[in-house]
Image (spheres, rainbow, N blue to C red):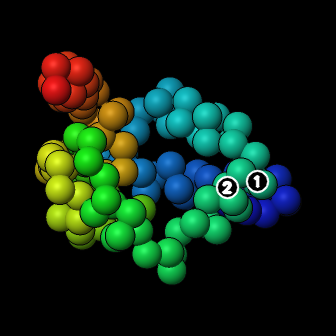
């Protein structure tokens, strides 16, 4: 997905989109996801790698005092569910919400539940 070669980039992005969901997408949904992923410039994709990997976020997460909702699909092939579990443990005010049948895209794979939980979280945080 970092290649300047458009054909290679498209093929890699297609593989990424397939990895983002637990169940195969309808053709129309696949095309939409491919399109919005391709809209992200190669330079922006590369920049995300600069802060991932060896960066240790534990101290920063532990210092957070605001409420946090960690939403993660148990079938995620992009970011291991253990990462979400650890992040939730590192944050004193975090709530972890597992989507058992979702991959990397719970916002898409179970949009109704995702939107409901997010709205409830925002409402509770606003009352805090």
- Quarter of the rendering occupied by the C terminus: top left
Q: Which numbered tag is attached to residue 45?
A: 2
Residue 100: give x, y in percent of width and height. 14, 50
Tally of marks: 2
Residue 35 lies left or right of residue 107; in this view the side is right
Find residue 121 and report its image quarter: top left
The answer to whether 118 is drawn above or below residue 21 in the figure is above
Mark 1 Cα-neighbour bin, 10 Å: few <14, some 14–19, many ≥20: some
Find residue 25 and report its image quarter: top left
Q: Is residue 85 visible?
A: no
Residue 10 lies left or right of residue 86; in this view the side is right
Q: Is residue 30 visible?
A: yes
- Quarter of the rendering occupied by the N terminus: bottom right
Disc 2 and disc 1 in contact, CB within 8 angstroms: yes
Residue at 23% in and 40% down = 67
The answer to whether 85 is drawn above or below residue 32 in the figure is below
Mark 2 Cα-neighbour bin, 10 Å: few <14, some 14–19, many ≥20: few
Helix, strand or loop at label 1? It is helix
Residue that numbered label 1 is attached to: 42
Residue 31: give x, y in percent of width and height. 57, 33
Which residue is at the far bottom? 54
Residue 35: give x, y in percent of width and height. 64, 34
Q: Nearer the viewer, residue 101 or 64?
A: 64
Q: Which numbered tag is attached to residue 7?
A: none
Residue at 50% in and 27% down = 28
Helix, strand or loop at label 2? It is helix
Residue at 41% in and 68% down = 57
Residue at 28% in and 63% down = 62
């Amino acid at each position: 997905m970092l290649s300047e070669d458009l054909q290679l980039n498209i093929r890699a992005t297609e593989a990424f989109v397939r990895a983002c969901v637990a169940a195969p997408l309808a053709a129309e949904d696949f095309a939409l996801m491919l399109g919005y992923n391709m809209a992200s410039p190669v330079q922006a994709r590369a920049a995300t790698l600069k802060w991932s990997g060896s960066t240790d976020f534990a101290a920063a997460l532990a210092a957070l005092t605001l409420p946090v909702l960690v939403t993660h699909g148990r079938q995620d092939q992009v970011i291991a569910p253990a990462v979400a579990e650890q992040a939730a443990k590192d944050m004193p005010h975090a709530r972890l919400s597992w989507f058992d049948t979702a991959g990397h895209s719970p916002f898409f794979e179970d949009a109704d539940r995702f939107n409901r939980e997010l709205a409830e979280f925002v409402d509770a945080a606003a009352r805090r």
